[in-house]
Amino acid sequence: MKLWIGACLVAMVVLAALAAPALAPHDPVEMDLLNILLPPFWQAGADPAFPLGTDALGRCLLSRLLYGARIALTVAFVAATAAAVVGSALAVLAGYRGGWVDWLISRAIDVWMSFPPVVLSLILMVAFGVGLWNVVAAIVLVDWTRFARVVRAEVLVVVRRDYVAAARLSGFSHLRTALREVVPAVAPLMLTLLSLEMGIAVVVEAILSFVGLSVGPTVPAWGVMIADGRSDMVQHPYGLLLPVLAILATVLGFNLLGDGLRQKLNPQHRGRTP
Amino acid sequence: MGLILIRMIGYRSAAALPLMLAVSVLIFLVLRLIPADPIGLSLPPNATAEDRAELARLFGLDLPIWQQYLRWLARVATGEFGTSIHFRRDVADLILTTLPATLELVLVGILIGTLAGVGGGLWLFAERNRPWAEGVLDTGASALMAVPEFLWAILLILSLGVAWRLLPFLGRIDPALSVPVVTGFILADAMIAGRVDALVSALAHLTLPALALGLSLAPLIARVLRASLLDTVAEDYIQRARLSGLSERQVLIRHALPNAVLPTISLIGVQSGFMFGGTLLVEVIFAYPGLGNLMVDAVRATDLPVIQAAALAYCAVVLALNLIVDIVTIALNPKLRPAP
């Protein structure tokens, strides 16, 4: 059940992001100073031209939400995938090779885990400067450990299995054994982590753009909308509430998808109703 | 046993030191990547190449990077973090005035989260025989856990702060009130000063941010406590306690809970480190004058000495928390101690 709810939520956000130019009634950065702080359609005084109302500069909230989904999902997919590739590669290397390689990678993970992730991503963004790809790079550099830590533990179990020894004995090279025998065994775990990481990336992007360190203040990202909506939250709470709900729906979608995948892909759970 | 424990504590503390050093190297290197040119910014446009070289020598920027790091480390080790460009104050002083506020927030957050989580876990355990419970609670817990602290913060402000006007949501205390700073922990300071009005105001201001933190901890605790209670009550000694005529409540409180609570305690320990990082955004949203607000202000002003010091302070607290958690876990669980 979780898997399907999650998949539906994610699919809806993806569709909204892809179809943003077609669905959005306005340009997301177009200001209309005659129509500022309009309420959404279910409230008195709403203008049908702005279905979810406008912000303090008269920008259409629906259009901004739709275009914000594009930024959130770009960051989520690219950053999470890259973090998964980097983290898992290092994990397989550490778990398979062992010895000093494992020691080095494990100590690096320890150092990274001493940072609150938000703090590390903030100083990285200070160093990189704002920009969409810098956000992606910061998330990868912070969150590769989430994969490395968990996948390494799993690799350590897998490499002791007989079929890995059999592959080596039948003449497979180390690289081939790692790619053909070890990686497929840890792939379900990686997929679950990937889905959870996408949710985390959405939140991190929102945090960074809220602080003003992500994509720049003029780009319609959800975190920027939250920062903008905060100043008028007393008379116009929707400017704040709508981006919060958008983030929640997206994160919940990725989390449920990840949880569902874990239950589906784990042979020990198969056949049990979650 | 005491000796072994002390030896383990010594060993773990010694292991934290190289980590702290590595963390400082990382912070130093990352902030060296910064695109802005500090020398160019502090010189007039008609400065000559000699002026530049002179200033670089003055700041030690002409040395190799590892020498720069060692010089910085030597100063940091003696508690000398420099002067903030943005706040025009001593950086160590800034950190020491904001850190207690953040620690206070985390501690109250953990308290609220633990109370709510244990309550929730016991309730889930009591409802264990309802057929609907499993699926609904499972999905519900996932949904609650998906909400990050800073979104809880905004939702709490919008509901309890703005819509119902129940609680204040800006700052640490009513601006009209103030108490002399003794410990930096405002609740303690208000009690020392004997000011009931200040204590009430500080508690009211602390409630929403701490609740935002606690709400992200509570569902985790509830879930883990329920699971370990279910495991524990299946054990033989619980059956024996029942057979000896104790009531269900007595069995739960005297026999099941003390044994089921260990995983919950380690969970609280692990999560407290994450929660400490989570305060950063919560502080910004509640304009709460702690380390997080300091760091974000410094980041916005590219105030490097403050950014470095605040990042170091965050890591030092996380490592200290991990150390405390290790010690408590070893003290509570004899199985983790090495044989004498």
Image (spheres, helix red, strand yellow):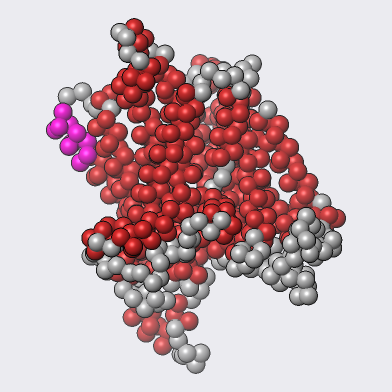
Q: Position of residue A39 (x, y in %)?
A: 74, 62
Q: For residue A185, which quarter of the picture?
A: top right
Judged from this view, the residue extending furthest toward the left is B3
Q: Position of residue A114 (x, y in %)?
A: 39, 48
Q: For residue A89, which quarter of the picture?
A: top right
Q: Position of residue A212 (x, y in %)?
A: 57, 65
| Left or right of residue B133: residue A7 | right
Residue range in magenta is: B1-10
The N terminus of chain B, quarter of image: top left
Q: Residue at x 45, y 86 (%)?
A: B43
Q: Position of residue B338 (x, y in %)?
A: 23, 26
Relative to residue B17, is residue A252 depicted above or below?
above
Q: For residue B195, which quarter of the picture?
A: bottom left
Judged from this view, the residue extending furthest toward the bottom is B46
Instruction: Residue A78: tell me if it is visible.
Output: no
Q: Residue at x 71, y 53 (%)?
A: A69
Instruction: Residue A7: tell me if it is visible.
Output: yes
Q: Residue at x 82, y 64 (%)?
A: A47
Front in this rendered view, residue A33 or B16: A33
